[in-house]
Structure formats: structure tokens, C-alpha cells
Amino acid sequence: MHARVAQDALLVRRSVARKGPGPRQPLSQRRPKIAQVKGAPSPRIPKKSPPTSKVRPAAPKPGIPTTLQTAPQRSRAPKRIPQANLGRHAAEVFEKLFALYPDAHCELDYQNAFQLLVATILSAQCTDQRVNMVTPTLFARYPDAAALAAARQEDVEEIIRSTGFFRNKARNLIGMAGAVVDRHAANIPATMDELVLLPGVGRKTANVVLGNACGINEGVVVDTHVQRLSARLGLTSQADPGKIERDLMALYDRDRWTLLSHLLIWHGRRVCYARKPRCAECALNTICPSAFRV
Ligand code: SF4
């Protein structure tokens, strides 16, 4: 009996081997490999639970208000100062900055309006320290507008080369000096309208000259530091320098405009850096809407 069963099984195996596995079924008709019991719930792949963080919250830092350290930071954008509080906030910003930098001033070296105008043109895309390194040679060789107007471009370029964009700057310096000689009897004009018509002179440069060399508060100098700090400190929500200047002029009395720009520039150079502002050490971190958010 057993021998017969074994023989039948052998015959079946040989028959299957001769015929081969047969035609493959289309994909839509193939059965799943996992047998499913009728009526039983379909098998489910268990979901992975999110990994739990093992990072402990940092210990509070000494010297920084706890509210500033532990406040949940949903957004890195600075909080807006309510319009009703903006005047008081602006005054507080000025007072704190003035307490920090009572002797804030223009850091370009100059002795008259002509020298300051030249130095300010050179300071575009360049540090004041670098400008102060080249101007002694430049002023010794070209002490006034008439001398600079008669200069050869390549000689000026050679002196100011290290300030960057030297060809353009040399062309503007000689052009500005020529216009001052031709239109203003070699004297630097003391109005915004006349200054901005000189080659290489925009509103920012004119504000520097008027505010510092002429003692005229015509506007607020909006350079990269003033632009950055006035936004971080909640003094403006504008990005355009002209609109920022208008906001600052509306917030502060005219006699503070020149000093205000020095205070913001000094703080931007010493504490409120563009990339890594030193909020933990900043004397304004209790009133600054961007503190620890930048
Ligand atoms: S350093 Fe920080 S706290 Fe100070 S003004 Fe800049 S963003 Fe505000």
C-alpha cells in the first residue's frame, strides 16, 4: 500500500516537471501571499511612533530675564510694537543707546566738508577703517576740490585701490570735484538738493555731510546698520531705505536725527551684528522685539 502511494506521488511530480510552471497570471488576478481569514480584519502594518526627544531644555542663563529664555518661540520674526506704544518705545531705544554710546560720532576721519564727502564716497562697500587708511595719502596729494578735479584718474585709482570698486569711485570723486568747482566755486554745497546732483552722491552720503560737517539735521543716514537695527528694534517695518528714513524721522525730533544714526551704527558694529547678534549681552534685550529671535 505504502509503496503504491509513493509511486503515485512520484508520477505526479514528474508530470508537473514536464509541463513546467504554466502561464503566469496577470497581476490583477494574483492572490496576496498572506492568507486572509474571511471576516477577519485585514493585516495592518503598525505605525512607528515618533521618536521621543531626549534633549533636555537648557538651564536658564544668568543675567538674562527668564521670560526671554523660556518663552516659546513660534516665530523668528520680530514682534510688532503696537502703534500706541511706538513713540515711548522709540524714546526708550534712544535713551538706552545714548547711555551706551554717549560719544557716538562719525568714524570717518575728516577735517572739512570736502574731506568728509570724499571719505563717504569711498566708504561704499568698504569699512571706515580701510577708508581712514587711504585718505591721508589722498588728501595730502589732493587737498581740495580744485586739486582733485584736475587729478588723473589712474593716479587716484592707485591710491584708493584697496577700498574696492576703485575705478568707479575714482571717476565719481573726480566728477564730483569738477562739479563742485564748476557749480559752487569749489565750495561743498550745504543743501540736500545741490548735494544729490553731484556725481556719486546720494541721499545717504548727503545726510552724512550735512549732519556731520555742516551741523544740519536734514534726514537720518540709513546705511546697512541703520536698516538692520531699526527693523530689529521694531522702529520700522519697511525695507526700502527711503521709507525707513521717513519712519525714523517721524519717530524722533529733528535735532536727534544725526545722533540717532550714529547710535544705531555703533550698536550694529559692536553688538547687534548682522549674522550673530549678541542678544545675551545687549543692553536692549528687555525691550527689543527681536531679542533671541534673530
Ligand atoms: S543684539 Fe539682539 S537684543 Fe540687541 S538690538 Fe540686536 S536683536 Fe535686539
Image: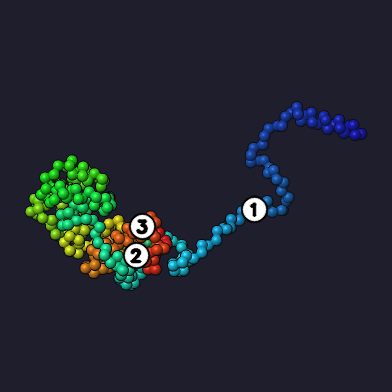
Q: Which mark is residue 234?
A: 2
Q: Quadrant of the C terminus?
A: bottom left
Q: Quadrant of residue 203?
A: bottom left
Q: Which mark is residue 242?
A: none
Q: Which residue is mark 3?
A: 273
Find the residue positioned furthest to the right.
Answer: 1
Give left or right: position of 263 versus 45: left
Label 1 or label 3, whichever comes before in sequence order: 1
Residue situated in front as seen by the camera: 165 or 86? 165
Q: Count neighbours of disc 3 (C-alpha within 10 A) and say few if under 14, some if 14 to 19, many if 20 or more.
A: some
- Residue occupying image coordinates x 64% and y 37%: 26
User: Does mark 3 have its CB less than 8 Å from ligand 1?
Assistant: yes
> Mark 2 belongs to which amino acid?
Gly
Q: Secondary structure at mark 2?
A: loop
- Residue occupying image coordinates x 12% and y 57%: 189
Which of the two discs, 1 and 3, sits closer to the camera? Answer: 3
Residue situated in front as seen by the camera: 46 or 169? 169
Q: Are marks 1 and 3 in contact (CB under 8 Å)?
A: no
Q: Count neighbours of disc 1 (C-alpha within 10 A) and say few if under 14, some if 14 to 19, many if 20 or more.
A: few
- Residue occupying image coordinates x 61% and y 53%: 48
Label 2 or label 3, whichever comes before in sequence order: 2
Q: Position of residue 131 (x, y in %)?
A: 24, 51
Residue situated in front as seen by the camera: 270 or 164? 270
Q: Secondary structure at mark 3?
A: loop
> Mark 3 belongs to which amino acid?
Tyr
Quadrant containing ligand 1:
bottom left
Q: Which residue is mark 1?
A: 46
- Residue occupying image coordinates x 46% and y 62%: 74
Q: Is residue 199 visible?
A: no
> Mark 1 belongs to which amino acid?
Pro
Label 1 or label 2, whichever comes before in sequence order: 1
